[in-house]
Amino acid sequence: AMTTLLHERGTLGLALATRAQITAAELAERARKLGRGSDPLVRQKIAQHTIEARALQLNGYRAVTAVKRNGIPGPEGSILKLMWSELNQRMTETAVDMGGPASQVGDGDGWKYQFLRSRANTIEAGTSEVLRNILAERVLGLPRSR
């Protein structure tokens, strides 16, 4: 079961990384459409999201390379899932924040749904907390938490 989960996370990782880059580009477009493109805080958040999406993609390549080399997935899939789910949460929060209170009502552009759905992403296929524990114990060699 664990091997299947590792393969699942590993192969899904690149797709999630691509989706994160698309979302970052959509955030930049949303900022322009809403007239928020010159707001330094919005620009900083979008730049940070774009950097993290690129790092996610590079880690995805690393995961695929490791599987090609070793034939079995390593911890990269768990790292990808953790990074993506939390980045996705931050990006959708930025999108909703840019829209102001009006983005909380209705959902003409889909961001409110994505924002609410992003909370589930940090739970499904292993909660962020569980993934942190797994990485701490198996990758970093830290003692089990009690």
Image (cartoon, helix red, strand yellow):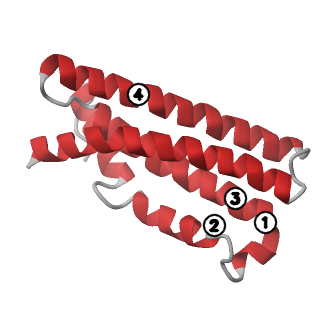
Mark 1 sits on what residue?
99
Q: Amino acid at mark 4?
A: Asn
- Percent x, y of residue 50: 63, 36
Mark 3 vs mark 1, CA separation in Å: 7 Å
Q: Are marks 3 and 1 in contact (CB under 8 Å)?
A: yes
Q: Amino acid at mark 1?
A: Gly
- Disc 1 element: helix
Toward which corner of the image does residue 124 lie, by quadrant? bottom left
* Mark number displayed over residue 111: 2
Mark 3 vs mark 4, CA separation in Å: 25 Å
Mark 2 vs mark 3, CA separation in Å: 7 Å
- Please identify the residue farthest to the top as the structure is shown: 69
- Percent x, y of residue 5: 18, 47
Mark 3 sits on what residue?
95
Q: Is residue 9 visible?
A: yes
Left or right: residue 20 compared with residue 68: right
Mark 1 vs mark 4, CA separation in Å: 31 Å
Q: Earlier in the sequence, mark 1 or mark 4?
A: 4
Q: Earlier in the sequence, mark 2 or mark 4?
A: 4
Q: Are marks 2 and 1 in contact (CB under 8 Å)?
A: yes
